[in-house]
């Protein structure tokens, strides 16, 4: 940034430079540059190598008749040396006058080693590829303001190498998960994002409307029901990695738009899904090169096999009550659940849906023990309408949630494939929605029930929060650190005064 200049002045000066550059017959935004090397390749080439590379100027040090600069692309940074005698008098004057930190340039020259041992491109030709109008973030301390970082992710990526590393790692993690499933014979598919009903999870959907069809549509809250239809149709191993949308609050672990993996396997159960998840986590740890991560001030070991905990056992241990005391067949025994909340001093009131009361007890008494990776198995049927009951106990289902670092990462079932039972369970969810004002209760998707009536094989299914596993593996406790563009409130801060854009010259 030019010393003692306001943002408004800098922008006005840069637009003035653009006009001067164009008036001199130079295009400040040429359409292409034929690079032969990435910046990393240029930096690692042998001395004397001929180099053509391009990148953004991130450091610039002028010294009269010569200058050192660093240019950066996605592969890294490299030093370039610009000398008046080598570049020519007019091009060097152009360089001194018009090239700033933030501009993209292409350089051509040969590689040499400075006396400090740094591989450097001796520039013989320099091309302005894109003129930056706004100044870059302060280069030595990076961009620290979290509000600006998330609202202007492009600046965050420019200023903070750690942020670039996180999103590069995220891409590798997704690839590792995808490769694991592909190698296990799963078929990757795509299912609708806009749906006529929002089932497959306990969540409030975003509602839209289709004008031509004159009908409401919903952004999907889960991938489940369409993927199960594919299993019914004979695609016995399927998965999808895609966006889902839930009209819920925003906190460190929740964003209204997030990325899920869901996978379904015929002739499998929740034990098979646990083994599949262990394989995916193992592939992810190989990607990051570590089996132990630091997360929320805890060292978390991700070396499989993971501990298996049974919910009825740990519920009794942490609450002092048999879990069956708050269950009544496939539903909750609400008076006893409220009584348990009172005894444990868990937040509650008479209007809180039973499913939320259960979650609050779990979060208050059980979640703190789930720092090291663990499968928690066998949940109440009342909160899991899409899973198969445990043989001999209709109040519990074959379901696990996988926890690590004190938070849920994945959720898996032995899937319910009995259409009559499924209709009854979803009908109970609708009763809860009406009787307990539970807006997040699952709904009846009659098209899905009809598909089940065609016959669904025994199936295991799993859902994995991609954002959450990236949070864990990168040691970031906030989802906003691992989502490129998190949902934010409108920016209420006043904008600094800026100059209006220059008028576009009218064609003759």
Image (tube, helix red, strand yellow):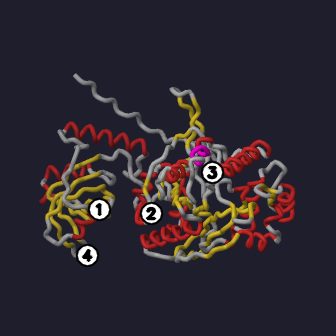
Q: Which residues are magenta?
A: 448-452
**Mark toward the start of the polypeptide (1 vs 2):** 1
Residue 114 placement: quadrant? bottom left
Q: Does label 4 or label 2 sit earlier along the sequence?
A: 4
Determine the CA span between mark 4 and mark 2: 48 Å
Is most of the magenta stretch helix, strand or loop? helix
Q: Is residue 29 above or below residue 182?
A: above
Q: How many other residues sit within 10 Å of disc 1, few (<14), some (14-19) or many (≥20)?
A: many
Residue 165 is tagged as none
Residue 478 occupies which quadrant of the picture? Answer: bottom right
Whether residue 160 is visible here, answered yes or no, is no
Residue tagged 1: 70
Which mark is in front, 1 or 3? Answer: 3
Q: Is residue 451 magenta?
A: yes
Q: Mark 1 and mark 3: span between their CA atoms?
A: 50 Å
Q: Disc 1 versus disc 4: distance between alpha carbons?
A: 15 Å
Residue at 16 percent of width and 51 percent of height: 91
Q: Are marks 1 and 2 in contact (CB under 8 Å)?
A: no
Residue labelled with disc 4: 116
Indicate the secondary structure of the residue bearing disc 3.
Answer: loop
Classify residue 69 as left or right of residue 48.
Answer: right
Is 385 in the magenta?
Answer: no
| Label 1 or label 3, whichever comes before in sequence order | 1
Q: Which residue is mark 2?
A: 181
Badge number at residue 201: 3
Q: Residues within 10 Å of mark 3 (few under 14, many from 20)?
A: many
Dot 2 or dot 3: first in sequence order is 2
Q: SS at mark 2?
A: helix
For the residues bearing labels 4 and 2, Cβ distance under 8 angstroms: no
Circle 4: element type: loop
């Amino acid at each position: 940034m030019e010393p003692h200049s306001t943002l408004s002045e800098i922008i006005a000066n840069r637009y003035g430079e653009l006009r001067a550059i164009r008036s001199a017959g130079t295009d400040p935004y040429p359409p292409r540059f034929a690079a032969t090397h990435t910046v990393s390749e240029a930096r690692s080439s042998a001395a004397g190598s001929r180099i053509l590379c391009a990148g953004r100027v991130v450091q610039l040090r002028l010294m009269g008749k010569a200058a050192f600069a660093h240019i950066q692309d996605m592969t890294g940074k490299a030093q370039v040396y610009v000398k008046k005698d080598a570049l020519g008098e007019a091009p060097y004057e152009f360089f001194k006058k018009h090239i700033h930190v933030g501009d993209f340039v292409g350089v051509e020259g040969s590689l040499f080693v400075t006396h400090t041992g740094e591989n450097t491109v001796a520039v013989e030709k320099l091309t302005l590829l894109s003129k930056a109008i706004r100044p870059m973030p302060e280069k030595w301390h990076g961009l620290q303001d979290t509000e600006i970082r998330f609202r202007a992710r492009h600046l965050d990526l420019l200023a903070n190498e750690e942020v670039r590393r996180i999103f590069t790692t995220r891409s590798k993690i997704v690839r590792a998960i995808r490769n694991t499933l592909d190698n296990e014979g799963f078929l990757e598919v795509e299912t609708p994002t806009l749906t006529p009903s929002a089932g497959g999870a306990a969540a409030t959907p975003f509602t839209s409307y289709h004008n031509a069809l004159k009908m409401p549509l919903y952004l999907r809250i889960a991938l489940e029901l369409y993927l199960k239809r594919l299993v019914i149709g004979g695609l016995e191993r399927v998965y999808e990695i895609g966006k889902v949308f839930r009209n819920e609050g925003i906190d460190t672990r929740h964003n209204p738009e997030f990325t899920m993996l869901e996978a379904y396997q015929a002739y499998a159960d929740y034990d098979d899904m646990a083994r599949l998840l262990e394989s995916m986590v193992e592939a992810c740890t190989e990607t990051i090169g570590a089996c132990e991560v630091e997360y929320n001030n805890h060292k978390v070991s991700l070396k499989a096999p993971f501990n298996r905990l049974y919910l009825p056992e740990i519920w009794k241990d942490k609450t002092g009550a048999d879990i069956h005391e708050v269950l009544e067949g496939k539903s909750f025994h609400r008076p006893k659940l409220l009584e348990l909340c009172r005894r444990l001093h868990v937040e509650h009131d008479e209007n809180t849906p039973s499913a939320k009361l259960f979650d609050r007890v779990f979060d208050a008494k059980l979640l703190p023990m789930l720092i090291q990776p663990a499968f928690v198995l066998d949940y109440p049927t009342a909160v899991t309408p899409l899973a198969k009951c445990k043989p001999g106990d209709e109040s519990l289902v074959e379901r696990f949630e996988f926890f690590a670092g004190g938070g849920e990462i994945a959720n898996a079932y032995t899937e319910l494939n009995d259409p009559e039972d499924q209709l009854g369970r979803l009908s109970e969810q609708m009763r809860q929605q009406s009787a307990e004002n539970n807006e997040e209760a699952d709904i009846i998707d009659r098209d899905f029930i009809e598909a089940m009536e065609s016959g669904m094989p025994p199936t295991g299914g799993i859902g994995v929060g991609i954002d959450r596993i990236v949070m864990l593996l990168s040691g970031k406790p906030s989802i906003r650190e691992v989502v490129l563009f998190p949902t934010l409130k409108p920016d209420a801060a006043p904008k600094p005064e800026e100059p209006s854009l220059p008028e576009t010259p009218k064609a003759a």
